[in-house]
Amino acid sequence: MDSSNPVHARRPRLGVFKLASCDGCQLTLLDCEDELLAVAQAVDIVHFPEASSSLMPEGPFDVVLVEGSLSTSEQLEQLHRIRKNARALVTIGACATAGGIQALRNFADHAEFARAVYARPDMLPILAKSTPVAEHVSVDFELRGCPIDKRQLIELIAAMLVGRAPVIPNESVCMECKRRGAVCVVVTKNQACLGPVTHAGCGAICPAFARGCYGCFGPRERPNTRALAQHMRAQGLTGREIARSFRLFTAYAPEFREESERHES
Amino acid sequence: MSRERTYKVDLLTRVEGEGRFHLVVDGEDVKEAHLSIFEAPRFFEAFMRGRSFQEAPDIVARICGICPVAYQMSAVRALENALAWVPTPEIRTLRRLLYCGEWIESHALHVFLLHAPDFLGYASAMDMARDHKALVERGLRMKKAGNSLIEVLGGRAIHPVSVRVGGFSRAPSPAELGALRPALEQGLGDALTTVKWASGLRAPELESDYVFVTLCAQDYPLEWGDQIAISGRGQFPVEAFDELFEEQQVARSNALHCRLRDGTPYLCGPMARLNHAHERLHPTALAALATSGLTLPLRNPYRSIVVRAIELVHAFAEALAIIDGYSCPQPACFDLEAASASGSGASEAPRGLLWHRYELDAGGLVETARIVPPTSQNQARIEADLVAIAPELLRLDHDAATRRCEQLIRAYDPCISCATHFLELTIDRAGADRSSAI
Ligand code: SF4
Ligand code: SF4
């Protein structure tokens, strides 16, 4: 995050915005029960409709957290306004960073979809695709996950307060599995698991709960999805099953999208 | 001379999701009373098609960050009904425990962070904490206890990962659950204090003649029940939902309104549950009800903050009882075989009845999915209540009147993200051609 121009004596002004989403990522802030009141003192939360009825949608903000994907043209206009009024824009969660589960409609037949849309002319102007924030405006930092991880959010806020970059390692869920001492579900149970190609951050929750990772933090940097898909085939998964595994909460992230497209049909 | 007044809020705050309301009153005449939902639809029912039944609990959780467990529970009930499988008593009990965690987390959030500021005159709980620190801390403590329960059972508080069709991917050890006891005991005490505090809040007068709708079983309605109770009309199988209720398309909203077949709006949620099933509350919660000063049947929605406090007592007391009698389900999960089948299931989300129905093909892929969340069921009733308070608003100044409307709407704890994922359904029915939807 930009720290070259530290905010003077005043508290940093924070805004929290929502696009198409389930509210789970912004709820993560309210779920920081031990830290919430301290955060509210350290930071000036000027716009957070889910938590407060005093609103200031036009900012200006030092930092905004944006949850959700772009699904309507109104949201697109809103996003440009948010960007204009914010020094730093942070996207939170799979909807904002990858289009979310609702991006599954991006893979549907558009002609069919349009016909469906016109059956209801009073409908909101729904965009053809559900897209991530970074496709439309510049993003200063992103927090992954569906939902984001509480510890990562606190780290981000702490870093922002002192003007340093947040420490959020880009490694795979496998690394976290090892650290947690979780048994590998691929080796011991022959389960399908996206852990090797998925961005760390959750602390390897799924393997610790005896199931494969379903990729809710999205692709890590340079994921070898091809090798993993080959392994899944060897495990006995059909092409469609492999396609479906890559096509969940971060289906529209390029690496997962391409891999799923390879196994369609 | 026209005495028309308009009360409106373009972005409702301290609710989940995005909505607005609009009330136009001319003298004593209500010209318009709308709660509009402009949250963007996400088309869950459309993209569920073609997914495996095993993926359903993970996917439907994402409809709502506040009540993901409710979505998971209604989905597994519907799918297990379809596949003609009945969960073992141990699995059922563990699910009830998980659901208690969600009720605690959601009710504590609503009572303290979303609704209390209306009663005490603050913009937010953070502002309120400057003058009422202990109060807000009590709410956060309970919320944390509920979240911890979900984390132990499902790995994380929002979108837990362990719920499967057929059971749990992993069941906690008795020691892990035992470790939660101190926080839950403290929570029970906090919840009892909350009942006392909430009973003392001044609630505006309002009595409406509600039709209450709840799930109905032997226990206080929560994760289980095969019957739906409708006040004054009787009990009906969950499978008969479509014969009982009708979803209507409303032009100004992205959600469908649900009414009884004869057009009557109805109410679900905490007040409905208390009225229908108070005698099935945990004894500790029943005792708290007795001291709360509420008289049944309760018909004042502003008092629902007291009801949520009583349900907090119930959820803590029940969670403690379950932990004390816990034995680990063996196995934690059964493998269910795919079959061409269909089934419905419902549970009591914190905000009320949540009904799901699925049709599966022979390979276990979803052919159709239908989800009716509590907020679209309550929406017509909320609008009727806005009409009911209109005469009283004349006695208030404009700001106070607007705040009164908001307070009323918040009393329902509307969950707007939940209400909006159903546009595809509207299209479907309007077009009468299922295959034309995405
Ligand atoms: S990323 Fe997941 S948790 Fe976050 S808003 Fe989207 S659906 Fe909800
Ligand atoms: S293991 Fe994978 S799917 Fe599970 S919580 Fe972590 S990133 Fe998400």
Image: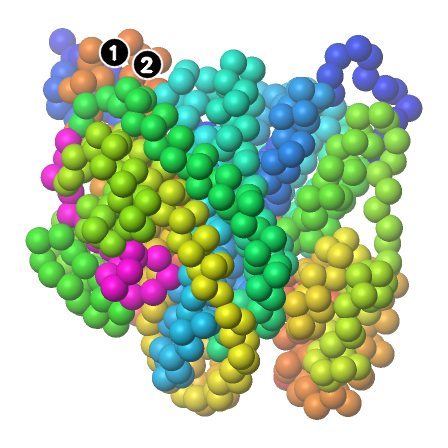
Using residue B145 as the reference point, say whether residue A181 is left or right of it: right
Please tell me which residue is depicted at 81% across the width and 17% down the height of the picture: A7
Residue at figure coordinates x 39%, y 71% from the top left:
B77
Badge 1 amino acid: Leu
Q: Residues within 10 Å of mark 1 (few under 14, many from 20)?
A: few
Q: Quadrant of residue A260?
A: bottom right
**In this rendering, is residue A155 above or below A22?**
above
The reply to whether the magenta stretch includes residue B211 is: yes
Confirm whether the magenta stretch covers residue A91. Answer: no
Q: Amino acid at mark 2?
A: Ala
Q: Looking at the picture, tell me which residue is in the foreground, A174 or A52.
A: A174
Q: What is the span of residues highlighted in magenta in the rendered image? A: B207-225
Q: Are marks 2 and 1 in contact (CB under 8 Å)?
A: yes
Q: Which residue is mark 1?
A: B396
Q: Nearer the viewer, residue A161 or B199?
A: B199
Against A13, residue A156 (above or below) is: below
What kind of secondary structure does the magenta stretch mostly adopt? Answer: loop
Residue A250, percent from left and from top: 68, 60
| Location of mark 2 (residue) | B400
Residue furthest left in the image: B232
Q: Nearer the viewer, residue B414 or B115?
A: B115
Residue at far right of view: A4
Instruction: State whether residue A145 appears in this view.
Output: yes
Residue B129 location in percent, x, y?
54, 20
- Residue B377 vs residue B133: left or right? left
